[in-house]
Amino acid sequence: NSTIVLTTATLPQVLCDSLIEEARRKRVKARCVVSEERPPRGSLKVNLERGSLLQVVEENLGRVEKPLLIVANTVESAVRVYQALREQGYKPVDYKLMLLHGRLKRETRKERETAFERGLNPNIVVATQVVEAGIDYDFRTVITDVAPIDSIIQRLGRCARLKSGEAYICSCAKEAAREATKYVYPSVIVERSLEKLDESILSKSLEDVKVAHDLISDVYTKEIIQKLQQNNIRKVIYSVTKFAYWMSSSKGIWELRTMNDVVRSLLRVSQEVRCLILADDDYSKLINGVSRGEFKVDWLKPDEVRNSFFSFSVRGDRTNYDFLIHDINGKRMYLALEFRGEEEAHVRCFTDFSGIRRELESISSLFLVVNPKFYEYDEEYDIGVVRVRGT
C-alpha cells in the first residue's frame, strides 16, 4: 500500500509505457506525468564541435568561464586531458584542478566528490561519466565527449544551474564519434543520438523537461530497445537473479557489494569485479606469503578494504588484464581475496582470467588484487589505474 514516485528527465516514452503496462499486470495503479514546470536556471549556449575532446579543450581553455567541467568517455582520455592541463601549469592544489573517475580508490574518489559539498570550489574538473549524477555544483562551462543523448543531457545539466553558461560537445563527426565511444556505448545508440544533435534543441532541453523527454524518446525507440534487448537480455536476467539470491542470504551482511554496484552491472555490457589496491607493505606481505604457500590473510582491516577498492567492468572481448597480474615465483598469476568473514580472507590464485569469470558466477565476495605498478600518482596526487593493459 505504498505510493512510489519515479522522477527523471531522461526516461524515454517506450520505457514509461513498458513500466505502466507491467504495473497494470500486477494490478498496480500507474500513470506517467510529463511536468510542464520549468526549472529556475540560467540559459545554456551549446556548440557542436568536430574536433576531439583534447583539441577543443586546448583551443578554448583560455577564454571560457570557470569553473569548467571536462567530461571524457574513458579514464585514459580523462588522464590525457589532465596531463595536458598540468603541462600548461594547472595544479591539483587547493582544488584548482581535479581528476575524478571510477578507477580511483574508493576513499580518494569520495574525498574528491565531497569537495563540492564542502565548498572548496574546484576550478577545473576533469572527469568521466561518474559526474553525470550526484554532483551538485554550478559549472559555468562544460566540454564533453559525444555520448548517447541521455548522457549528454545529464552532462549539460551540470552547467548553468544558476547563471548562464556554455557547453561544447566534441567529436560530433561520425568517424570521430565512433572512436570516442567505442568499447563504452552501443554504436546503434551513438549513431541515433548523432542524428538528433541540435544546438537549439539541446539548449531548450535543460529548460523544458518535455523537450528533454521527447528528444530522448526519439533516440530510444521501440525498435532500438528491441535491438539492445536481443544482445543483453540474458546478462540482465542473470544479474537480477544473482542479486535476488544475494539479498536472501545472511552472508550478504558483510559483503561490500552494494545496490549501486548491481545497478551499474545491469547498465553495462560487461561484468563488474572489485579491484583492491593494497598499501606497499601489505602488498609485499601478501606476495611473500603466497610465494611461501601461505594463503590465509587475517591481518587486513575491514576499513582498509572498504576504502581501497574500485569496481571495474570486465568485457567479453578481452581475456587478460595486466594491471591485475603478479609475479609469483617467476609465474604470472592473478590473485583474488575471498572474504569469509570480517577478519579473514583466503587467497585464490588463477593463471588466466577465464577462471576468475567462472568463479564470479558463484562467489560474490572476491576482490582482485591490483598490481601497484599500475596505480599511478602525479607527485602525491592519485591518478588511479589508467592502463589496464601494457607495461
Image: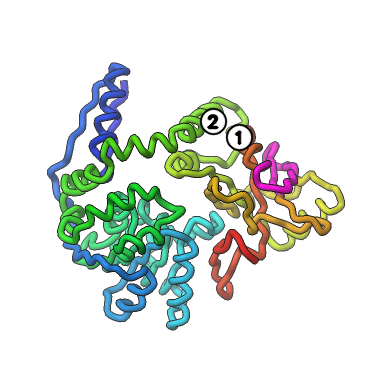
The CA span between labels 1 and 2 is 8 Å
Q: Secondary structure at mark 1?
A: loop
Position of 376 relative to 203 (above/below): below
The residue located at (19%, 44%) in the rendering is 214
Q: Is residue 40 visible?
A: no
Considering the image in quadrants, where does the N terminus appear?
top left
In the rendered structure, the answer to whether residue 26 lies left or right of residue 259 reads: left
Check disc 2: other Cα within 10 Å, few if <14, some if 14-19, many if 20+: some
**Residue 336 magenta:** yes
* Residue 217 x %, y %: 23, 42
Image coordinates for residue 58, horizontal then vertical, percent: 36, 77
Mark 2 lies on a secondary structure that is helix
Q: Is residue 33 left or right of residue 70?
A: left
Q: Nearer the viewer, mark 1 or mark 2?
A: 1
Q: Residue at x 19, y 65 (%)?
A: 45
Nearest the eye: 182 or 263: 182
Q: Is residue 49 above or below residue 21?
A: below
Dot label at residue 242? 2
Check whether the beta carbons of the residues at disc 1 and disc 2 lie within 8 A of each other.
yes
Q: Magenta residues, as a range?
A: 335-355
| Residue nearest the observer in this picture, 173 or 91 | 173
Q: Quadrant of residue 386?
A: bottom right
The amino acid on which the numbered mark 1 sits, given as a three-letter code, is Glu
Question: Looking at the image, which residue is at 37% across and 52% down?
Answer: 134
Q: How is the image coloured?
A: rainbow
Is residue 170 shown above or below 298?
A: below
Check disc 1: other Cα within 10 Å, few if <14, some if 14-19, many if 20+.
few
According to the image, label 1 marks what residue? 361
Magenta residue check for 171: no
Locate residue 156: give its quadrant. Answer: bottom left
Q: What residue sits 30% from the left and 77% below the top? A: 60
Q: Which of the 4 quarters of the picture holds residue 72? A: bottom left
